[in-house]
Amino acid sequence: MKMIENNTVIEVKNLKLYFPINRGFFRRKVGDIKAIDDISFRIRNNETLGLVGESGCGKTTTGRCILRLYRPTSGNIIFQGHDISSIPESRVKPLRRNMGAIFQDPYGSLNPRQTAGLIAGMPLIVHHMVEKGHFDDQVAEIFRLVGLDPSMMDRVPHEFSGGQRQRLGIARALACRPSLVVCDEPISALDVSIQAQIINLLEELQEKLGLTYLFIAHDLSVVQHISDRVAVMYLGRIVEITHSQELYDNPVHPYTRALLSAVPIPNPSVEKKRHRIVLKGEVPSPAHPPPGCHFHPRCSMSTAECRESMPPLRDLGNGHEVACFKA
């Protein structure tokens, strides 16, 4: 067992996850898809870390690795003092009761044949946390916690609205009172008005229950609102990580600057004067990432050093880390 700081809920060190590419009649391995390529970060107690980046950069895969739905190729995932990166599934299950997951699709992530009460209470059954004859009472308490009426426990998912389904998904994630919740784009499939309700609910639950969130999203304005710190991913690597307000006030990595320049500002006069950074080219394939800095083919600041060497995350002060030679 490896111990970490008391206020750190989870620490990820040099995490890699490669998916093999197999071809031919004998399914011979010819390469790897480097979904996660050597990332490190930590999340402290009662903190929200936002994880942002383009589609396909490895955000969701990172969340699934932390939940040990995928076994990493290498690296360490230290959760509450236990390195869970390589332990067998039988030993992961007792620890997983302290983890929750909220999924992106409130329609596809719920079993259409089960009642809402059974969906929300299933973790209690799986982890043997319900007393005989008290299941309905415990589920009713979870329903009230997320703003659902306990009288809806006998309904099936198609009888709920989109926002109610996501509340049901949150209820399921919190059934075992976890310390860490992985939120995998929990609002991207919802209407804008409902998004605000779900974000407010997550913040209220965090304050009430002392939760720690890994909040995965691509909407930078939402991430700014809910996150204490933000990590920016590009092609399987973290390129910048710092406090939320610092990232938006002083982005250092050229990729972060390009992302933030694409966020619309609800002020026409300010929006008109703002400089828009348009990246050249396309995102490279994770099966054949560029050597050195993965961002160098699209970066206007790249040099020979960027093409040859991978820049490490270095601290610029006050917890602002960036992986760029020219920052």
Image (cartoon, rainbow, N blue to C red):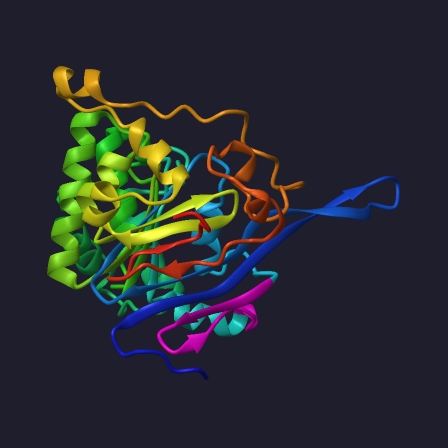
Judging depth in this view, the residue of 278 and 42 nearest the camera is 278
Residue 268 rendering spot, x and y as whole percentages:
15, 15
| 224 on left or right of 73 | left
| 115 on left or right of 67 | left
| Residue at the front extreme of this rendering | 304
Let me know if residue 160 appears in the view. no
Question: What residue appears at the point 28 percent right and 23 percent down from the top-left corner?
Answer: 275
Q: Quadrant of residue 94?
A: bottom left
Q: Quadrant of residue 176?
A: bottom left
Question: What residue appears at the point 57 percent right and 49 percent down from the top-left corner?
Answer: 305
Question: What residue appears at the point 19 percent right and 24 percent down from the top-left corner?
Answer: 265
Let me know if residue 210 appears in the view. yes
Question: What residue appears at the point 44 percent right and 52 percent down from the top-left corner?
Answer: 323
Q: Is residue 327 magenta?
A: no
Q: Is residue 80 magenta?
A: yes
Residue 23 rendering spot, x and y as whole percentages:
81, 40
| 22 on left or right of 168 | right
67 to 6, vertically: above or below: above
209 to 95, vertically: above or below: above
Residue range in magenta is 74-89
Judging depth in this view, the residue of 129 and 315 nearest the camera is 315
Judging depth in this view, the residue of 7 and 172 nearest the camera is 7
Residue 152 rendering spot, x and y as whole percentages:
19, 40
Judging depth in this view, the residue of 145 and 98 nearest the camera is 98
